[in-house]
Image: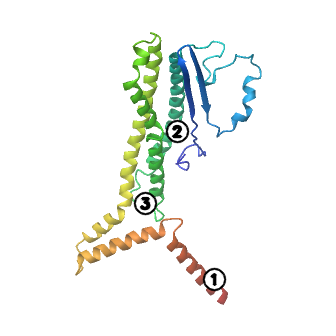
Amino acid sequence: LPLRTWSKDQEYLFYYEAQISSLSLGPDEWFWTEYFLVETYFGSEGRISTYFEDCDPGDGFDPPLGGIGRMNIPRYDPREYWLMKVERRVLQVTKEYAALVDTFDARMENYEKNIANVFEDDPYITHTRVLANVISTIQLFSGYIYIASTLDAWKTFRSTQISYFTTFGKPEWQIRIDRIIQDMSELERLRNMLLNKQERFECKLRNYIAFPLLFTTALFSMQFMQPPLPWLVFFGVLTGTTISNYIVAPYINPLREWMDRQLQKAWTGWHGAN
């Protein structure tokens, strides 16, 4: 997670994505099979036997329901079972995103306070790079890969297929649907908060990037700067300023590496001669 240096805890935090898939398949509502696939990235699939060590056959928690239903109390209606899965997993996703976004937001708040009065970046464009990384992470969280895809999937389902659970569904199903809607509203709030931060940081980033142009414009607005060919000199100074920033800024830069090697050779030769 970015902005560790500007956080209060100074901890290295990492985020991972794990996916699950579920499919209910059968000829009717009385004879069907549930296929449940989990992400194998974390390696826990090798310890699957531990989940059933102290359980009688057919007992224990139902994995697709995420620990809220037991296998000895089966749900025979596939629509009810599917709705329970969605409710549980949406709650899980919302809680995990809330923890992630709130932690990231706290770091962004601290960083924003630190650069509130910093109107010019340093020669290594530290803040330019930090802001670019933060904006990229915001786009990852709020974009179509994460939160936006979940919200869009729910909106599509709600506008096209929700009638399968409302028109002929049980009255108690509406309570589950309302909980899902509430969690989706929370995801929308988190996404809007990220987008607001993105807009503010993009404005700050534009100011840092535009500094060479602003510097050159301010220089040529002074009375004593009246060169014979003002536009030629203007673009010459602007180009020189931009190239200078490019040379000194990146940590890995071919031109800068070449200059460092030449300086190292010169220093070695001078030191050997003395």
Q: Is residue 42 left or right of residue 156?
A: right
Q: Position of residue 267 (x, y in %)?
A: 60, 82
Q: Position of residue 269 (x, y in %)?
A: 63, 86
Q: In percent of the image, x 44 and y 36: which residue is there?
A: 149
Q: In the rendering, which numbered label is found on residue 121?
A: 3
Q: In percent of the image, x 51 and y 34: which residue is there?
A: 97
**If the image is split into quadrants, where does the N terminus sit?**
top right
Q: Position of residue 71 (x, y in %)?
A: 65, 16
Mark 2 or mark 1: whose residue is earlier in sequence = 2
**If the image is split into quadrants, where does the C terminus sit?**
bottom right
Q: Is residue 113 left or right of residue 261?
A: left
Total numbered labels = 3
Query: From mark 3 to mark 2, how far is it between C-alphas?
Result: 26 Å
Identify the coloring. rainbow
Please name the residue that numbered disc 1 is placed on.
268
Q: The disc labelled 3 sits on which kind of residue? A: Asp
Please name the residue that numbered disc 2 is placed on.
103
Q: Secondary structure at mark 2?
A: helix
Q: The disc labelled 1 sits on which kind of residue? A: Thr
Q: Furthest-top residue in view?
A: 171
